Amino acid sequence: MRTDLVSEPGTADRPNEDFAGVGLPACGQGGCVIVLDGVTPPGGATGCLHSVPWFTARLGGALTELTVSGRDLTLTEILARAIARTAEAHAETCDLSHPRTPQATVVLVRWSSDSVEYLVLSDSVLLLRGADGTVLPVLDDRLARLPRSALATDALVDANLRNREGGFFTAAADPSVAARAVIGTLPRGEVRALAALTDGASRWTETFGEGDWTDLLDVIAKEGAGALVERVRRLEAADREERAFLRRSKTHDDATVVYAEL
């Protein structure tokens, strides 16, 4: 069993809003990977007293505990319970119905001696390498299907596209969004390795087009998770002025990669 994890903030003056965890139960029968990308709210009120890192830490902690101990629960049930548990932690002090309430994307993977289960909600990425070397990307592409004019953060909120039909879904305060996630199960023997990435790391493929998903996973496997993030940072820095690739997007984003060889 080999794991590799890196999580870097986009800039030194802002806290990292991502969460990453690897769970390896003492029984040695399997494990799990959890990756969250906290959604940075646009300017203005959020209805919440708490920061995005506060939210992702609590949601990530709940997901880790439930995934490791709740072997009788499906991943959809685990996400729903974790969202509910996190919401209960600040329901009395915060307006959880506010469209800018803290929220996050989710990648959740759990494996046993028999199977590999996965769940993806919103635009973080899961890559699965098969026994024959082929790479299967697991993507929730709802956000990518929206018109480019709607992709600015303020526009997403103003157009009421977040956690709505016709838009896309994130883990916020409503447990029912867990049912919107992309889920699946594969035999353990069909998965040799996996990588979970927030969009700050998947930019190497999705934004800069430096290679396809197989190329990206090869970089992580051969050079390490940190090497991929370093490559992304160099590309971002080179595009800082021209904005040929990043357009109106922020130059640097929090970047998280978790890699596991099963």
Image (cartoon, rainbow, N blue to C red):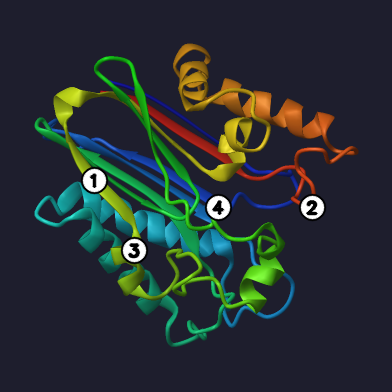
Which quadrant holds residue 151?
bottom right
Marker disc for residue 184: 1
Residue 127 located left or right of residue 66? right
Three-letter amino acid code at disc 2? Arg
Q: Quadrant of the C terminus?
A: top left
Which is more toward the observer, 95 or 244? 244
How far separated are the C-alphas under marks 1 and 3?
13 Å
Given contact means CB atoms under 8 Å apart, are the residues at marks 2 and 4 in contact? no
Disc nearer the start of the sequence (3/2): 3
Given contact means CB atoms under 8 Å apart, are the residues at marks 4 and 1 in contact? no
How far separated are the C-alphas under marks 1 and 2?
34 Å
Given contact means CB atoms under 8 Å apart, are the residues at marks 3 and 4 in contact? no
Q: Position of residue 125 (x, y in %)?
A: 45, 41
Which is more toward the observer, 121 or 21? 121
Residue corresponding to mark 2: 248
Residue corresponding to mark 3: 180
What residue is at 24 percent from the left and 59 percent from the top? 76
Disc nearer the start of the sequence (4/1): 4
Three-letter amino acid code at disc 4? Ala
What residue is at 58 percent from the left and 78 percent from the top? 160
How far separated are the C-alphas under marks 4 and 1?
21 Å
Crowding around mark 2 (Cα neighbors within 10 Å: few <14, some 14 to 19, many 20+) is few
What residue is at 44 percent from the left and 73 percent from the top? 165
Q: Position of residue 254 (x, y in %)?
A: 62, 44
In what element is the residue under mark 2?
Answer: loop
Three-letter amino acid code at disc 3? Arg
Disc nearer the start of the sequence (3/4): 4
Q: Quadrant of the N terminus?
A: top left
In what element is the residue under mark 4?
Answer: loop
Crowding around mark 4 (Cα neighbors within 10 Å: few <14, some 14 to 19, many 20+) is some
How far separated are the C-alphas under marks 3 and 2?
29 Å
Residue 174 located left or right of residue 199? left
